[in-house]
Amino acid sequence: MSNTSRWLKRAVAASAVLALGVTLSACSGTSGSTANSNRPENVIHVAVYGDAGNTVEQAMVDKFNATSKVQVILDRIPGANYQQKLQTIISTDAAPDVFFNWGGGSIQPFVKANLLLPLTDMIKTDPALQSSFLPSVFNAAAIDEVPYGIPMRGTQPVILFNNKQVLTDAGITAPKTWDDLLADVKVLTAKGITPIALGGADQWPTLMWFEYLFDRVAGPDLLTKAIGGDTTVWDSADGKAALTKLKSLIDAGAFGTNFDSVSFVDGGSPALLRTGKAAFELMGSWEYSTQQTADKAWTEANLGYTGFPSIADGKGDGADLVGNTNNYYSVIKATRYPDTARDFLKLMYSDEFVQAQLAIGNLPTTTTTEKFLDQAADPAYATFQFNLVKDAPAFQLSWDQAYPQSASADLKTAVSQFFTGKLDVAGFISAMQAL
Amino acid sequence: MKRPTTGRSRHSGGPNVGRPGFAWALPATIFFALFAIVPLIGVAVMSFTSWSGLGSPEFNGLDNWNKLLGDKVMMQSLWLSALLTLLGVLIQTPLSILLGVWAAGQQKNRAVLSAIYFIPLLLSSAAVSVLWRALLDPNFGIPGQLAGIFGGDGNLLGSQAGAIAVLTFVGAWQFTPLHTLLYQGAARSVPPVLYQAAEIDGAGTMRKFFSITLPQLRNTIVTSGILMVVGGLTTFDTVLILTKGGPGTDTTITPYYMYRKAFQSFDFGVGSAIALVLVVIATAISLIMVRATGYDKMNSAQEGI
């Protein structure tokens, strides 16, 4: 009996020590200055948003690995909830060395938590890492003027798409001004066609209308100020005017009545446009490849595209853009091989990369892009987009990415409630001020 | 009588015959402690901190709780959770009692039909939600094609009433089979002698149902009711996929709001506070139900037979 209890005591003590030991060693591992010795040897992990565009990224990785001692491993993270998955792993030892992001607000919390490597030194060693990209795009991934991201993939401006056949049948043209748009809406509703397809269930397509209206009416400064902390701008006369204009478009029946049940992600709103049940859709440049996947012949013959209409008495330029400025690769501070990461990032401005991206329909923002435009999947569409971006006086990053992630859910709720009429102008303003 | 004093002789008789000691419950207890109690304590601690998932949590006292008290969406979400749960119980209970009693019959066709009817339960809630989301698409789904029946624009998910109706319907579609199964088993175990006696006394089908079947199903109604209430309060996947808490926040029930705060806004402190509220409410409701119905005494429904 006493033997048993002594054995038990010993076992308990031993396991307690073991548990403590594990905890202690874990602590010294994360808090020590040599955190990167915990990271795997001779490999760096590159995390990307998993989708059809991964073919080019894989090709770049293969090319790099052929000559490098430290190997690059491409981790494709399935697209939905990418940001959430990233935030879960980024402060752990399993964090990728280099990761895909949208610049701006999407990396700001990581910079604040001191997790990202400022790229200043890399750029000093290799100035082409900065000078090869269009400045407006490069700067969208700088936080407090310190660069944290190298552009990869391409720029994705938001464009007003249309169904050419529907426009011809209705005897109208794509709108150049806001008044044109209102007139088109009138004609289309009279014919029983939903003027504008909107994937309201996803909420972010709804947000695009706010982004353009505020830019056109109040100018691009309003959002810069609002994100900077000056929330009084929402209550300004310009802000109210933008909301009133948008409200009148909604009330005119421009989006039909059931947009809240329609989703872009499910293919609902693109199908409305393609089948002629709707005439327009405001969407990121990826609408083209979405439609192409669904019906290649239709897309080539019938998918029209124009910039967002200008608003006559507004403060914003009619050529301003909103959308995803670009995607970026950022490097985490804990990486064991910053030099390897730098060498890998150099590929992002290589001719081969630009050509490969153009071939799958993306539009890279290097200074060399222009000379390869004729090699794009659809040269006319690529040239159209490139000129939009080149000529734009301002390119506003999508609000949900410009704002920190913590504000994004409330932002989208306010946006969708304004469209359904649950929030009026004053209600929307106070919701935005509370972000 | 001298009570046995040593542990060994306990096995050979006395009041504890057939009652295994605590050691038997040890594996389950350890499992429960590791995977339920410990995380619960963690969540309780976290509800007093501010943490975005990066760096270390920082204590911020009662900030999260104060925020939650003044949060209209949170208060609304509690009412919505209660409403959805209540609707679920009110619709599924009569349906599953009737179906279960019907399926309890020994006829071949009933066995085949109840097997088919059981299928929705075998599908995951996520798959069921994706399926119904596609079927209810306003332009290309059933409402769009049968505009004559549904009327209007097929915007089922675009209004609060419509979205709640869809959630209730999909919940019922998936979970009625489970409760039907419970009632089928219970109805089969009603002693036939009761019905035979009632027939001799001249009772008809209706009378037999209300005076014998229903009272005999009492314990099953409580069991199934508790399952429905707890299941209703923790509903999440159908809302995430079908409505995303929308339109606006019109179907943002408490578990979905917790997810939104913790995993979309990365405010794990407030998320934990919501989780704790949910734990307290669900526990309280279960306890009240068990007490009020006398379920904890587990008296047999066959006393006096």
Image (cartoon, grey):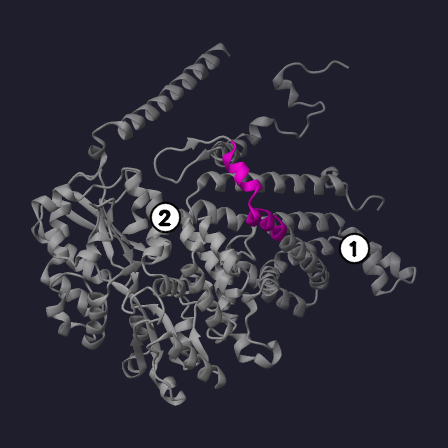
- The part of the image, by quadrant, that contains residue A308 is bottom left
Q: Which of B247 and B15 is in front in this view?
A: B247
- Start and end of the magenta stretch? B62-81
Q: Which of A130 and A228 is in front in this view?
A: A228
Relative to A317, say whether A80 is above or below.
above
Q: Residue A112 carries which label?
A: none
The chain carrying label 1 is B
Left or right placement of residue A246 versus residue A403 in this view? right
Left or right placement of residue A175 versus residue A39 in this view? right
Q: Residue at x 67, y 51 (%)?
A: B224
Circles 1 and 2 on the same subunit: no
Q: Which amino acid does label 2 sit on?
A: Pro
Residue B245 in percent (x, y) is at 52, 56
Q: Name the residue under label 2.
A: A404
Q: Rate crowding at label 1 as few (under 14), some (14 to 19) or many (20 or more) other CA atoms within 10 Å.
A: some
Q: Label 2's element?
A: loop
Q: Does the magenta stretch include residue A218?
A: no
Q: Rate crowding at label 2 as few (under 14), some (14 to 19) or many (20 or more) other CA atoms within 10 Å.
A: some
Q: Which amino acid does label 1 sit on?
A: Leu
Q: Residue B214 carries which label?
A: 1
